[in-house]
Image (cartoon, helix red, strand yellow):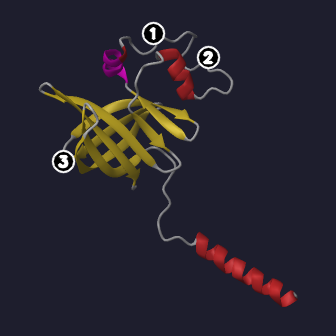
Amino acid sequence: MKTRTKLFLVVAIIIGLAACNKTDEPIDNSIEGTYSGILTNKSATGTIIGTSNATADISKTSDGLIEVHCYGDELDTTFMLNYYNNNDSVMVCLTGNAFEEMYGHMMGQGHMGGGMMGDIQNGETPWQHHLSDEHQLEDEHFGGFDMMNHTFGYRFQTTDGDNQYMLDFQGEKSR
């Protein structure tokens, strides 16, 4: 019986060491970094027109604000987004003039309390607080980060003449 126990422990230790000895560098758990992925071009009705490789470089510029540089064969754009923690996700929202153009009011006009985020309710995530203070129920948002899978997705809405279409980026953090 003692021999079996020792053999079991040796096998368990070897398996444990092998599982912990990965050769890939761990991905840090911040939203900053490079996300490599696919840009899907869709018509306004959702029909896929084409796909291409694309990259999004994400960098924090200040607390709550990121710069996104998304580029590939179909797109090369840089823009700013606000970001908000939401459990195992980080959600994004337009900022500045883009926010005002999309939602019809400046950021902060819907805020009921004193200072920004100063009146967050018990158990409410920063994202939930942002939604309740700044948005109507039907307001659309265009992306965010899945922190468990280290991915970033964002939808660009654009027009080409009279034709409206969407470019959906979906990428995985590579560094």
Question: Is residue 47 left or right of 21 when viewed as pictured?
Answer: left
**What distance separates the C-alpha of mark 1 from that of mark 3?**
38 Å
**Residue closest to the far bottom:** 3
Give the residue number, with chain letter if any, for mark 1. Answer: 109
Q: Quadrant of the N terminus?
A: bottom right
Q: Residue furthest right?
A: 1
Instruction: Check the picture and name the quadrant holding the C terminus.
Output: bottom left
Asked if the residues shown at circle 2 and circle 3 are in contact, with their CB atoms under 8 angstroms apart, the answer is no
Query: Residue 75, percent across and down?
Result: 21, 41
Total numbered circles: 3
- Say which of 80 and 35 sits in front: 35
Quick check: is 20 in the magenta stretch?
Answer: no
Percent x, y of residue 130 = 51, 22
According to the image, label 3 marks what residue? 73
Q: Up-down: is 116 above or below 38?
A: above
- Say which label, 1 or 2, has the lower sequence index: 1
Dividing the picture into quarters, in which one does residue 61 lie? top left
Q: Position of residue 55 (x, y in %)?
A: 30, 49
Packing grade of label 2 (10 A; few <14, some 14-19, many >=20) is few
As drawn, 51 above or below 129: below
Magenta stretch, main secondary structure class: helix
At mark 3, the secondary structure is: loop
Contact? badges 1 and 3 (CB < 8 Å): no
Q: Amino acid at mark 1?
A: Gln
Label 2 sits on residue: 119
Establish if 131 lies above or below 105.
below
Q: Secondary structure at mark 2?
A: loop
Q: CA distance from mark 1 to mark 2?
A: 15 Å
Magenta segment: 95-102
N-terminal label among 2 and 3: 3
How crowded pointer 1 is (Cα within 10 Å; few <14, some 14-19, many 20+) is rated as: few
- The vertical placement of 152 against 133, above or below, is below
